[in-house]
Amino acid sequence: MAAMKVHGYPLSTATQRVLACLYEKDVEFQFVNVDMIAGEHKSPNFLPLNVSDKGTQLLLPGSNKTMAVFQLWKEVEAHQFDPPSTKLVFELRYKPHFGMTTDAAVVEEYEDKLAKVLDVYEARLAESKYLACDHFTLADLHHLPTVQYLLGSSAKKMFDSRPHVSAWVADITARPAWSKVMGMLKQ
């Protein structure tokens, strides 16, 4: 069977999540760089392909309670963690990269919002190795791109100051699949 083609832009957090999933699932793929500036990513030729039953079990089999906990942490990531962390990535990483000025007031506002979320994570991670349960799932994987970008900024202190969050971040960013994604960025 031919390798799956993954169309994306390596700096995109969405692309990084897909790549991390594929590496976790041990799926062979060919990466095709997409010119997002030209709008190539909006072409109907680049529909997502994400079907796999290999590698790390990223979804939780089992009871309704287990699935409910998993869904809860996916929702927390999507609605509580992602908005302030994405805004901080834009202010602290993308703006400097593109020669734009970081807005200190915006950074302060969104650091305060992210701090509240990380306090909830700290309490959860004191009870569980990962967010949804005691093994790595999509609830953890979805954090990787924004966490990685924030670790390379002044926001790193927010993760380092919370021991359970810091241990979780060290664990998820050291995963072999994520190391492969980061290796692609260096090419």
Image (spheres, rainbow, N blue to C red):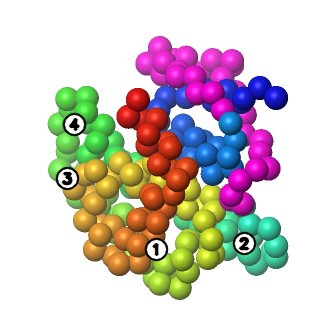
| 2 vs 3, front mark | 2
In the displayed image of the protein, which residue is found farthest to the bottom?
127
Kind of residue indicated by mark 3: Ala
How far is disc 2 from disc 1 in space, using C-alphas?
17 Å
Is 107 magenta? The answer is no
Kind of residue indicated by mark 2: Ala
Picture residue at 77% right of the left edge, 42% below the top: 51
In this figure, which residue is indicated by the disc labeled 4?
96
In this figure, which residue is indicated by the disc labeled 3?
105
Looking at the image, residue 177 sits to the left or right of residue 81; the answer is right
Q: Is residue 57 visible?
A: yes
In this figure, which residue is indicated by the disc labeled 2?
68
**Which one is earlier in the sequence, the residue at label 2 or at label 3?**
2
Residues marked 3 and 4 touching at CB (< 8 Å): no
In this figure, which residue is indicated by the disc labeled 1?
121
Picture residue at 74% right of the left edge, 66% below the top: 60
**Which one is earlier in the sequence, the residue at label 3 or at label 1?**
3
Kind of residue indicated by mark 4: Pro
Tag 1 secondary structure: helix
**Which one is earlier in the sequence, the residue at label 3 or at label 4?**
4
- Picture quadrant of residue 133: bottom right
Picture layout, residue 134 above or below residue 29: below
**Which one is earlier in the sequence, the residue at label 2 or at label 1?**
2
